[in-house]
Image (spheres, rainbow, N blue to C red):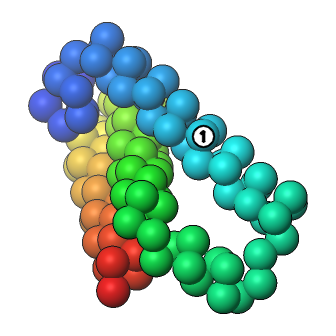
Amino acid sequence: MVTSVTNLGRSGLSDWIMQRVTAVVLLAYVIFISYVLLVCSPDYQEWKSLFENTAMRVFSAAAILAIAMHAWIGMWSVSTDYLTERTLGCKATFIRLTFQAICAAVLFTYVVWGIQILWS
């Protein structure tokens, strides 16, 4: 049996709620960026001034964090459902924890890099 030591919300319900909240944040961000690109069709200076706005930086940072949370919950669910003793054999725990560690490292790098790009 897999315990919930490595999931984000420590319970299935909170993970489910976080998955839905992050999906709404990402949907709002995609709709806004699509609107800007399709309707406003900004040039470089307009695009630059949009991302110099603090509200846009906060919104983009929220979208980056939402992507990371959404991806972590999804990858944790997939790894605990499919990387099991029954499907992989005796090394399932090692493989699952290695997979989760790699996912965590990639997501951490993505968040730090994204925030650095936004606020530099």
Residue 62 in the figure: left or right of residue 46: left
The part of the image, by quadrant, that contains residue 50 is bottom right
Question: Can residue 33 be seen from the camera position used here?
Answer: yes
Q: How many numbered marks are there?
A: 1
Give the camera-side residue of 93 and 35: 35
Name the spot of residue 111 as percent of width and height, x first. 34, 65
Residue 91 in the figure: left or right of residue 106: left
Q: Amino acid at mark 1?
A: Ala
Residue 93 in the figure: left or right of residue 110: left
Disc 1 designates what residue?
A: 28
Give the camera-side residue of 22 and 60: 60
Name the spot of residue 20 as percent of width and height, x first. 48, 24
Residue 49 in the figure: left or right of residue 1: right
Quadrant assignment for the C terminus: bottom left
Q: Residue at x 58, y 83 (%)?
A: 48
Name the spot of residue 3 as percent of width and height, x first. 17, 23
Q: Residue at x 67, y 80 (%)?
A: 46
The part of the image, by quadrant, that contains residue 36 is bottom right
Above or below residue 112? Residue 82 is: above
Give the camera-side residue of 79 and 24: 24
Question: Can residue 77 be seen from the camera position used here?
Answer: no
Quadrant assignment for the N terminus: top left
Q: Residue at x 34, y 71 (%)?
A: 115
Q: Label 1, secondary structure: give it.
A: helix
Above or below residue 60? Residue 69 is: above
Give the camera-side residue of 10 and 88: 10
